[in-house]
Structure formats: structure tokens, C-alpha cells
Image (cartoon, grey):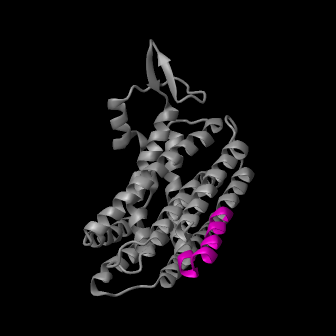
Amino acid sequence: MTPDQISYLTFVILIIGALIFDLGLLSKRNTTISIKKALWQTIFWVLLSLAFCTFLWFEKSPMVATKYFTAYLMEWSLSIDNIFVFILIFSYFRVKESDSARALLIGILLAIVFRILFIALGIELIERVHAILYFFGAFLIWTGYKLFFQKNDAEFDPGKTKIYRFMKKVLRLSETEPNGRYFVEHNGKIFFTNLAVVVLMLGGVDIAFALDSIPTVVSLVREDANVPFTADDILVIYSSNIFAVLGLRSLFFLLRGAVDKFDFLQQGIAIVLVFIGVKMLIEFFDIRISIFVSLGVIVACLTGSILYSINHNRKRAVKEKNI
């Protein structure tokens, strides 16, 4: 077998084995996920991702491993910022604790299918139309600017989204208590329950998230926009995306009670998006920014925004206590 075949096979085996382990031992049907259990699951997925990074270091090269780690860190941070939207969806449709884990897993698996298709489409599009990179660069700058000054994610109303309105038009929806079911039968007709709606919404919403994350990772991984994608580039793009998305479920249960503790995380992510957008645009002038600089910027922005959030909340708590 070639090194590329070994790498892809290792990736597939890790993912399948991890999903079997997760489904069979960590996510049994009709069970609730405690903070402790979510913490162990999060550690499991992070360690698995780092294990694959170590594999790439020895099987491929330190550069490929660095690209993977940078892309994974970026995807992971974007996932954290998206968790609040997922929380609003689950709250809006009143999903029971016992149904949350399985519904979230199915939604994430659906999102992975969409990601695979979108990544393949994006790579093909970039290969054929090089100038689209500059469009993506401008889009990321605009997205980062909007995210930086966005006051509140609470404006997101799942019931008013285009995805939900579309489903109400084309699908038969039931208000019956799901009790773990995704479909129910009434008068010989099949209806979708709220659990099925949640799963479809998670997959649909992730498509919107992918519009930011996929161009970002492509820019981080590809050193020279004039050189075609290599097998290593494609492996890093797919693996970093899939590992980050699979770890999102445990992160959801771990952070859903603490999302408001990181008030300024979105500003840190916004700065990173603007940086990546600028990185894509200046390639027009043959100016390249190394993966190590990109990694440093990502780590500095995320760490700084988290520490600033913690310090800000601490000062606010002290101020409220003294009032």
C-alpha cells in the first residue's frame, strides 16, 4: 500500500471504531449526558484527534501534521461558537434530555455527509475557477466584521428560519410527543416528529456554518494557490473537518451551561476570520503567510478572547456583589 492509502485507511478505521465505541458504550439510547460524561467524551475525541495528528507527523511529515493541527483547531473553535445556535434549536423544540444525545449524533452525522459533499464541490470549484478564492477571502472578511460587532446570538429564532419554514411547507409535521421516535403514523400517513425536525435543522444549519469553515481551512492548508491540491491537502481538509464536527456533540453537553462565560470568544474568532480573508486576498500579490504564523494568530486570538472573557466576567461578578 502507498503512504496515502495507509493514511486514508487509518483515518477511516479510527472514525468507524470511534463511532462504534461512542454509540455502543458512551451514547446508549434514552440516556442523559452528565457534565462528567460529556467531559470524558470531549477528552476522548480530542485525544483521538491528537493521535491522528501524531500519526501524520511520523507517517507523512511534521508540516502535514502542523497543517492538520492548525485546521483542526480552527474548526474546533468555530464549532464552539456555533454551539449556542444548537442550544437554541433544542430549547425551541423542547427536546428531552434522554433524546438529546442520539438526535444530536444523527444530526451531526448528517452534517458530515453535507460537509463531504461541500468540500468535494469546493475543491473542484477552486481548481477550475482560481479567482473564486478572492471571493471567499472577501466573504470571510465581511463575515468576520459582522461577527465582531454582533451583539447577541439570541436574535436567532429557529421557528423563523428559512429551513424550518421550508420543512413546514413540504413535510407533514406532528406535534405528538416524540418519545424517542423520529416518525409517527396518523391515519395511515407518516409524519415527522420534532426530533426529526431538529436533526434536519442541525444538518441544514451546518451548511451555513460550512460556508465559513471550509474556505478558511482550505486557505490554511494550501500553501500556494497556484499549485493543485495534493493528496495530503485533501486528507488534512477532510480529517480536520470530520474530527472537529464529531467532537461537537460532547462539547455541546459540556458547554451548554457555560456558553455565556465566553462573551468575547466570537470577537476572537472574528479576528481570525478577517486574518484568513486577508491571507487569501494578498495571495493575488504573491504574498504568502506560513502555516506557523497562521497557527500563532489562531492560538493568540482564541486564548486572548477566552482569558479576556473570564477576566471580564470576574470583574462583573465582583461589581455586582459590591452593589
Residue 48, compared with residue 130, is above or below; it is above
Q: Is residue 263 visible?
A: no
Q: Residue at x 38, y 56 (%)?
A: 118
Q: Which of these two is toward me, 202 or 89?
A: 202
- Which quarter of the rendering shows the C terminus? bottom right
Q: Position of residue 233 (x, y in %)?
A: 46, 71
Q: Which residues are magenta?
A: 47-65
Q: Which of these two is toward me, 111 or 14?
A: 14
Asked if residue 97 is among those painted magenta in the image, a careful observer would answer no
Q: Position of residue 50 (x, y in %)?
A: 64, 68
Tell me if 31 is positioned left or right of 274 in this view.
right
Q: Is residue 52 visible?
A: yes
Q: Residue at x 59, y 52 (%)?
A: 252
- Which quarter of the rendering shows the N terminus? bottom right
Decide whether the magenta segment is chiefly helix, strand or loop. Answer: helix
Tell me if 281 is positioned left or right of 41 in this view.
left
Q: Position of residue 78 (x, y in %)?
A: 49, 63
Q: Which of these two is toward me, 210 or 161?
A: 210
Residue 245, compared with residue 179, is above or below; it is below
